[in-house]
Amino acid sequence: MKYPFVLVGSGRLAFQVAELIMEDSGGIGYKAFSYCRHASESSLVPFQRIFSMPSQFAYAVAIGNPSQREIEANFFAKISACATPLNIISSTCYIAKSSKIKKNSGVIALPRAIIGSHAHIGKFALIGSGAIIEHDCNIEEFCTIGPGAVICGSVNVGNSSFVGANATVIQSLSIGGNSIIGAGAVVIRDVGSKLLAIGNPSKTKKREKSDCNPL
């Protein structure tokens, strides 16, 4: 890497992403730093903490909450025209050649994730370990797909939605933006925007303030 890398995040997800980066790169040839605006100075961080940005840097946002990840990504876009979001893709992922993930779009895909043919992954999406995104799915910007979740073919998941661990969304459905699919839920019909879907089969209700942080 020709310039420093900044990892945003102080939770366990940030540590997992840091380990992934070190394993896939061998830890050679770049300097990596952590930047956490909303964490106390005593918080554990995976790399050396910094409080101001280099003049030019690459970065990734390792925060599971979609809305918080969007806030941080927008913050970086505003403070520097020389900040480049990197895709962090585990070497153990399967990504079909016909899938669409733009270069330098801040996508994170953790180990053993599967992204099928003609699937589209929007910027700053987070794909959890072992998640399956089947053919022709559209995962929009800032979405979180939890570990082991299964998104069957031709599903659209709207911006900043959260799909919990081991949830299943059957084929040809639409999940509206800013919605939460609970862990283990089985979604058999469309889910509108800003809704919470839980259970098997899932039932929906309007998101409450207590549902704003799905983690």
Image (spheres, rainbow, N blue to C red):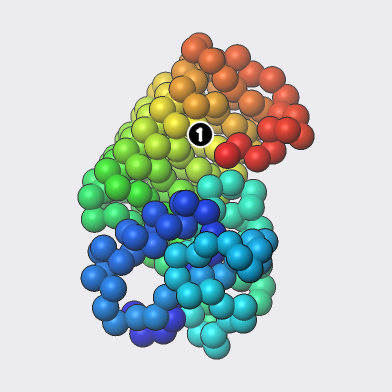
Image check: 140 left or right of 79?
Answer: left
Image check: 207 left or right of 177?
Answer: right
Q: Residue at x 33, y 35 (%)?
A: 132
Image check: 65 left or right of 132?
Answer: right
The percent coordinates of residue 126 (x first, y second) are 46, 49
Q: Residue at x 36, y 85 (%)?
A: 2
Q: Quadrant of the N terminus?
A: bottom left
Say if residue 185 shows up in the picture: yes
Mark 1, Cα crowd under 10 Å, few <14 / some 14-19 / many 20+, is many
Q: Quadrant of the C terminus?
A: top right
Q: Is residue 113 above or below residue 208?
A: below
Q: Is residue 107 above or below residue 169?
A: below
Image check: 205 left or right of 190?
Answer: right
The single residue placed furthest to the front in the displayed view is: 42
Q: Residue at x 54, y 82 (%)?
A: 82
Say if residue 96 shows up in the picture: no
Q: Residue at x 47, y 51 (%)?
A: 12
The percent coordinates of residue 75 (x first, y second) are 66, 67
| Residue of label 1 | 163
The percent coordinates of residue 6 (x first, y second) are 49, 72
The percent coordinates of residue 148 (x first, y second) are 36, 33
Name which quarter of the figure residue 88 lies in. Answer: bottom left
Q: Secondary structure at mark 1?
A: strand
The single residue placed furthest to the right in the displayed view is: 209
Q: Amino acid at mark 1?
A: Val
The single residue placed furthest to the top in the displayed view is: 201
The single residue placed furthest to the bottom in the displayed view is: 55
Name which quarter of the figure residue 118 lies in. Answer: top left
